[in-house]
Image (cartoon, rainbow, N blue to C red):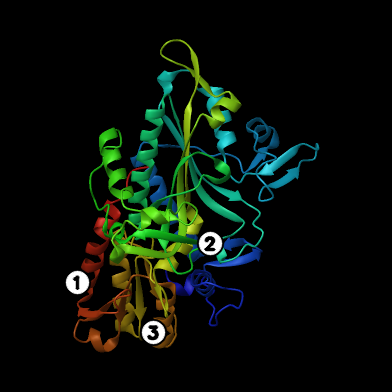
Amino acid sequence: MRLSRYFLPVLKEDPKEAQIVSHRLMLRAGMIKQQSAGIYSWLPLGLKVLRRIEQIVHEEQARAGHIPVLMPTIQSADLWRESGRYDDYGQEMLRIKDRHDRDMLFGPTNEEVITDIFRAHVNSYKDLPLTLYQIQWKFRDEVRPRFGVMRGREFLMKDGYNFDLTREAALHAYNRHLVSYLRTYERMGLQAIPMRADGGPIGGDYTHEFLVLAETGESEVFYDSAITELKFGDRAIDYDSVEQCQSILEEFTSRYARTDETHDEATFAQIPEDRRRSARGIEVGQIFYFGTKYSESMGATVVGPDGARVPVEMGSHGIGVSRLLGAIIEASHDDKGIIWPEGVTPFHVGIVNLKQGDASTDSACQAIYDDLRAAGLDPLYDDRDERAGAKFAGMDLIGLPWRITVGPRGLANNKVELTSRRSGESEEMSPSEAVARIKAIYDPVIAAGYPV
């Protein structure tokens, strides 16, 4: 994409309404525009990152054997009355009436709808196990929406639901989700720590939250610092293997890590003092096992091996897709702007032309741009007639991981400059070497993808 043809309405000044770094930088970088309290339009740059995050979530769900569906945002209140949650959920639920005076709602979550789909179409234990998921917009009417996309009222969320015949099978689904989430977050450049948590309005007594450590986190967390040394890496996973998924769960949950809601000071005190940590954390996902809570109340049963009908065992599993964008910025930025990890960057590399209109630099930039696109990469070429300082500041603000700078002085020696946004280090090399280096950086990132 040529920047001269792109819609990127950056702001020069910090917006007064932004209280945290991610909100400030998303507004300044032209990623979002607030339409009303807690509700945003996603502008082209923000939408590109959102779609990259969404794609990673889809790929890792497919890798784990989960099947996508798409459920409506507007739901019937009758389903929620069946489960007993319509009156219990609270004022976060946006309740509305249609033209026929029927009670409706803008879905804050989808346990009732997915259970209704299941009971209409699945009758036998032979159709189990089954995990369905979607990525869909949700609405929760927060009392004080703030912090941009971190605590908005309208948000994009992945919610998945497993249906199993036995408790043991449902707990394997729980473990499978924990493993797939670890891989998902690492591909985004995040270390999300699984922490024992409270079930809240969804219910269930077996649940973990995934939290990213950040000073602006809404939750206080307590953890053993040894857990931050764990990496999922590129290990091969057989998601059908109960033993392997259980082993990885135990590896990542055996160290103490709790939110303030479930913190146990006596247990925490048993950790060596030099490894005890308290910090703030941003929740980016949560998994639940809640047994037959919804299947019993809503009649989601199957015929078992003995011919008798039994309620299915269920769990739900959520990832805050739009919230993740803010969390990544909170975890990866400096005083110049955003620093995107390679897995979610809106453009793979920026190309800066230091002398727009000069035949040699224009030709070299165009050749680099064409070569990168031919390699399957997505470059952003700053071809504006702007001073170099403004171009560098803009690239730093929007946070592309790599920048290729092309100027007449360097080209005289067949050299361009490749700069890492994260380290700030630069290296001179030929244009072809720069293209090869960028391709080598992204080859493993692209290879980590999974057919959806």
Say if residue 257 shows up in the picture: no
At horizontal 50% and vertical 38% (from top left) the residue drawn is 204
Mark-to-mark CA distance, 2 and 1: 40 Å
**Around disc 1, counting alpha carbons within 10 Å, would you say few (fewer than 14), some (14 to 19), or many (20 or more)?**
some
Mark 3, residue position: 357
133 or 302, nearer to the observer: 302
**Viewed as shown, does residue 324 lie left or right of 120?**
left
The relative height of residue 254 versus residue 32 in the rendered view (above or below) is above
The kind of residue on which mark 3 rests is: Gly
297 or 177, nearer to the observer: 297
The tag on residue 433 is 1
The kind of residue on which mark 1 rests is: Glu
Relative image position of residue 104 (x, y in whole percent):
71, 40
The tag on residue 150 is 2
At horizontal 42% and vertical 22% (from top left) the residue drawn is 127
Tally the marks.
3
Which SS class for mark 2?
helix
The tag on residue 242 is none
Quadrant that contains the C terminus: top left
Which quadrant holds residue 85? top right
**Around disc 3, counting alpha carbons within 10 Å, would you say few (fewer than 14), some (14 to 19), or many (20 or more)?**
few
Quadrant that contains the N terminus: bottom left
The kind of residue on which mark 2 rests is: Met
Relative image position of residue 178 (x, y in whole percent):
37, 44
Mark-to-mark CA distance, 3 and 2: 42 Å
